[in-house]
Image (cartoon, helix red, strand yellow):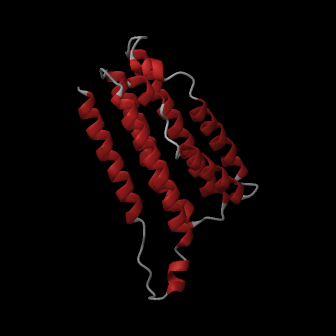
């Protein structure tokens, strides 16, 4: 399989994930602004998840740009990532509907942590399939931001039981941290 086919499949899956998230919005029965106010937690969880999906899509694109070959283990590692990303709409919807309850907020963090771990596995699988001198191997050294993200997700999930606002703040911090794109691959390819 070529990396273009892998990238096209992944792009399609991510587009479907975003579509599923937006379809969770239900039109209010009332026609006033107060009706929209009730949707604010759902909208905020959607925005946060949209940003996370966008971050994964952006970094996945850069990652595959440096790939020279695709193996069966890479395909499975990529599917593993897409599986966890596909659960984000469920976690987003549950958290949006029950924004002040700890279980939905904690589960959201666990899903994000598992997606982050799956991305880590994908990068390690890609590194193992390429020569040490490849641009990919040169670019993917220590992933401090990725490791910090996992630590924050795994810290935020149990903190949701102390105060959901702490967990939300930590999720938002990770999203803001990743809005500055990972430039390691771009630098290695130049």
Q: Is residue 125 above or below residue 173?
A: above
Q: Position of residue 189 (x, y in %)?
A: 38, 24
For residue 151, side relative to residue 89 (left or right) = right
- Looking at the picture, tell me which residue is in the foreground, 33 or 136: 136
Q: Is residue 70 above or below residue 116?
A: above
Q: Which residue is outermost to the bottom?
A: 31
User: Can the viewer see residue 153 in this picture?
Assistant: yes
Quadrant of the frame with the C terminus: top left
User: Can you see residue 87?
Assistant: no
Residue 88 location, x and y as percent? 47, 51
Labels in figure, total: 0
Q: Quadrant of residue 122?
A: top left
Residue sitting at x 65%, y 37%? 151
Q: Quadrant of residue 169?
A: bottom right
Please tell me which residue is depicted at 47% across the width and 33% down the height of the picture: 183
Residue shown at 60% from the left, 30% from the top: 144
Q: Quadrant of the N terminus?
A: top left
User: Looking at the image, which residue sits at the far top?
Assistant: 132
Q: Position of residue 146 (x, y in %)?
A: 57, 34
Q: Does 72 sit above or below residue 146?
A: above
| Residue displayed at 52% across by 67% down | 42
The answer to whether 64 appears left or right of 144 in the picture is left
Residue at the far right: name it.
162
Q: Position of residue 107 (x, y in %)?
A: 59, 50
């Amino acid at each position: 399989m070529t990396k273009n086919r892998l990238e096209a499949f992944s792009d399609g899956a991510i587009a479907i994930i975003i579509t599923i998230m937006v379809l969770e919005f239900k039109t209010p029965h009332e026609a006033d602004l107060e009706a929209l106010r009730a949707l604010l937690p759902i909208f905020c969880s959607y925005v946060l998840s949209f940003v996370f999906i966008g971050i994964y899509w952006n970094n996945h694109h850069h990652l595959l740009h440096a790939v020279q070959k695709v193996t069966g283990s890479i395909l499975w590692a990529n599917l593993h990532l897409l599986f966890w990303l596909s659960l984000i709409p469920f976690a987003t919807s549950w958290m949006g509907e029950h924004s002040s309850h700890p279980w939905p907020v904690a589960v959201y963090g666990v899903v994000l942590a598992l997606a982050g771990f799956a991305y880590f596995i994908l990068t390690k699988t890609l590194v193992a399939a390429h020569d040490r001198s490849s641009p990919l191997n040169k670019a993917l050294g220590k992933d401090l931001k990725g490791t910090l993200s996992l630590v924050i997700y795994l810290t935020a999930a149990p903190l949701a039981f102390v105060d959901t606002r702490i967990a939300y703040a930590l999720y938002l911090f990770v999203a803001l941290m990743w809005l500055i794109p990972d430039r390691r691959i771009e630098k290695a390819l130049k």
